[in-house]
Amino acid sequence: MSLLVVGLSHRSAPVSVLERAALHADAQMKLLQDTVAAEPAAEAAVLATCNRIELYADVDKFHAGVAELSTLLAQHSGVGLDELTPYLYVHYEDRAVHHLFSVACGLDSMVVGEGQILGQIKDSLARAQELHTAGRLLNDLFQQALRVGKRAHSETGIDRAGQSLVTFGLEQLASGAAVQDWALGKKALVIGAGSMSSLAAATLARVGVAEIVVANRTAERAERLAEILNDGGDVVARAVPMGSVSDELTRADVVVSCTGATGLVLTAEAVAAGRGLDAQPGVGGVPPVPTRAARVPADHGTEESCPLDLPPMPATAGFSVLGEAAVAGMAASELEQHAAWVDNAPRPQGSVAVVDPVQEADAIAALAATAAALGRVPERRRPEPVAEIPRPTPSLFLLDLAMPRDIDPAVHRLGGVRLVDIESLAEASADAPMAADVDQVRRIVADEVAAFGAALRAAHITPTVVALRTMAADVVAGEIARLDGRLPGLDDKQRSEITQTVRRVVDKLLHAPTVRVKQLAAEPGGAGYADALRTLFDLDPETVAAVSRAEDSTTDEKDRGSS
């Protein structure tokens, strides 16, 4: 087995990087085609969700495979390889199988135990089968992953540990209240009509919203979703074109957006206009954003900005007030210059000191040292806590489940608006309790990985065993033909008896070694037994390869018939 996976997820990369690296459907197809066209890879499949991008491949060389797959991910995501590499993880052979099985069971999801990942794995396999980039290895792997995921959900209580991303997002919007109580009677706008948006609409209907409006670029899909919602319960649903979103914002209490758009679907200005707010901080119910005090030189009273033109940094949740967000990615020399400016900058009288300047200077100097050592400034995943700004009670709730994001994160500055997106969900889920059933699921995964590896190793030797038995049958046939030439007077009964006797002798001689070699090959490190068998019996490599090709062809036909 030469299974390799290279990818990044919410566990390895900030949401900002995941957002930039997100692959739309056409990019995924091109990535698959380019991967199988590359030298080290024979098969390929892409698993791309809102919080992970993973490229699976059957490779003949590990190091060359890692380099090629990493380069292809960078090229098709549009994120430079140097920038992407620190966030990539690599799994090989059994570790790669373990990773996918864990993903299928929901153990690696942002919300542990969620079942939506199974549908995404199924879609990934279907895409690879459609493009003929999945051969025997990836077909078997992904189909087994689906079975393992279903087993985990049916045999354990992993469902109690987690829920769909939609449900978790609604819980975050409800801020501790029961979702059913919070949602009762609200009017919802769902932007998009894909699988995630459909799940969101169904969830909203189930928790008791009074009305659901579906907006989508393709009118037929929006109308179909609205029709399903109207047939399924008490909710009133209708479809509108995307151009009506701004009008619907004036009526909506809850907005859920998950589209495949590459740009923003809802800007802060559009939300502000739809709710009659002013998008400028400090006006129209928008709380003022305190910023770092600017330098005021002693010899004159005019304001002077940072010599590096760093923008003021808002002291709001999600940003560090120690300078990491403002200086991330800058060179060490620039960081040192900024640290010196912060250290020497006097604060005007009456200004609000957001941070201790000495503390901030020390933090930036430390980052400069990190940049000098690593060549970059790592983004902080969990920023320093800051005091929350008093905000009005929300009247508009926004849930952004898209990657890249659909809703401008600047809407969090609008008074009376609450936004939950993938980034805030990642932070909230990091502290979510895990059910005791997770340990049982981990044991299931470990057992299934061992069984899959054994079956794969055993299957690897099967063509060699088949080739050996074929060679033995040819030898028997040749000897019987030679016997016919020497003893032409044999009748049919005698010839049949001799033939059966010779075959039984050959079968008995081959039975024990072929059964034993299959057992040995199924154990870890057993791949060498096939080579030993070929060498001992001087088997023709092309005969073995022909058996493998025939089995792969049969497997491909079966998979296409069942997909």
Image: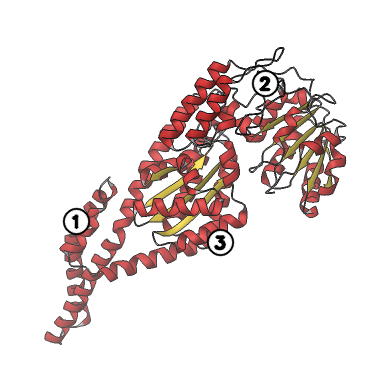
Q: Would residue 77 be found to the left or right of residue 37 on screen?
A: right
Q: Say which label, 1 or 2, has the lower sequence index.
A: 2
Element at badge 3?
helix
Q: Are marks 1 and 2 in contact (CB under 8 Å)?
A: no
> Mark on residue 77?
none
Q: Is residue 217 above or below residue 204?
A: below
Q: Amino acid at mark 1?
A: Pro
Element at badge 1?
helix
> Mark on residue 130?
3
Q: Label 3: how many residues lie within 10 Å, few (<14), some (14-19) or many (20+)?
A: few
Estimate the x, y position of residue 361 in percent, counting from the top left: 53, 21
Q: Is residue 115 visible?
A: no
Residue under numbered circle 1: 513
Q: Say which label, 1 or 3, has the lower sequence index.
A: 3
> Mark on residue 296?
2
Q: How many marks?
A: 3
Q: Are marks 2 and 3 in contact (CB under 8 Å)?
A: no
Q: Quadrant of residue 389?
A: top right
Report the front residue among 157 and 191: 191
